[in-house]
Amino acid sequence: MFDDPAYPSVPPPPEDDSVRPMSFLAAFLWSMGAQLLFVTTILLLGGASEWAGWNPVTRISCQAVAYLLVLFFTLRVYAPTARIRDFVAFRSTQWAMAPLALLLGASVAFPIDWVFAQLQPDEPDHFFGFLDVFFRMTMPERIAAGVAIAALGPVVEELIFRGALFTSLRKRYPPGAVMAGTGLLFAAVHLNPLAFVPLVVLGTGLGYLRWASGTIVVPLLMHAAYNGVGVYELLRIQSPSESTPTPLTHAGIGLAVALASLGLIYLLSRTQPARAARRADE
């Protein structure tokens, strides 16, 4: 009466949600492929209309299409059975890091902009590259462009660099190598040799936040705040001639605030929620 049934119910094996490891060479090819697709789209549009090619909203929309296509294919290759939120590390962590990431992104914009100005003194539009187009737009169009620069651009870039690439690279390499590697790739796709070193520093910092928090959300907030400072500077002036480089004193204060924010983020990275989020990458 109490014997085991002849055909016991056996639960199905859990779904395989593992992520396959990625090499740095593969990460380079994926990121360059995304940028090539983006630039090709821009050139095709620019061939029909110069305005379409350089309008900030059009430009970032093309970037979003190109990067999301690459994200889809990397998901199919490296994590075909995983949920996309797991692949891009959209997960909970120590959420006290969120306001610190915003403060870090806003403060670090000043020293980085100062460095850009030293490297490119004859190019006042060194950061955005399309100031003339921006100031031909109406104010509502400028606001739309600002939203695209501060929100949409960081989202699609973080989904690739601190999402898909970071997650797959962590299956093969230690955290420091992945932070530096994704920082190098982030700088390379911007196709600006003079700004390469500052962008490597920024990209590596974003990678550190990705590792420390275990989630893509924290570096995304930092990236959005960083871009947002540039957008604010564009919206508050009326012409490219009013654009001025960041004073050294502002750069110094920004650097001090950024370092203090990084120190607090490091302390928060040692808390249980952050450690639990990082374990998902191992």
Image (cartoon, helix red, strand yellow):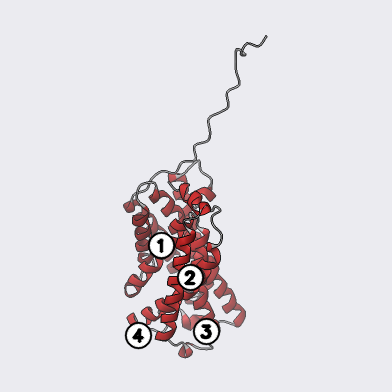
Q: Secondary structure at mark 2?
A: helix
Q: Earlier in the sequence, mark 1 or mark 4?
A: 1
SS assignment at label 3 = loop
Q: For label 2, count other residues whose C-alpha is less than 10 Å away and answer few (under 14), some (14-19) or many (20+).
A: many
Residue, disc 4:
121
Percent position (x, y) of residue 215? 50, 55
Drawn side of residue 85 relative to residue 185, left or right: right
* Dot 2 and dot 3 residues touching (CB under 8 Å): no
Q: Earlier in the sequence, mark 2 or mark 3?
A: 2
User: Which numbered dot is residue 104?
Assistant: 2
Q: Nearer the viewer, mark 2 or mark 4?
A: 2
Q: Which residue is mark 1?
A: 35
Is the residue under label 2 in contact with that under label 1 (CB below 8 Å)? Answer: no
Residue drawn 35% across the image and 85% down it: 121
Q: Does residue 32 appear to the left or right of 48 in the view shown?
A: left
Q: What separation in Å lies between label 3 and label 4 (alpha carbons)? A: 21 Å
Figure check: 220 above or below 226: above
Q: Earlier in the sequence, mark 1 or mark 2?
A: 1
Residue at 38 percent across and 83 percent down: it is 123
The label number, if any, that marks residue 69 in the structure image: none
Residue linked to disc 3:
135
Q: Are marks 3 and 4 in contact (CB under 8 Å)?
A: no
Of mark 2 and mark 4, the one earlier in the sequence is 2
Q: Amino acid at mark 4?
A: Pro
Q: CA distance from mark 2 to mark 4?
A: 25 Å
State which quadrant residue 247 falls in: bottom left
Question: Who is closer to the viewer here, 272 or 33?
Answer: 272
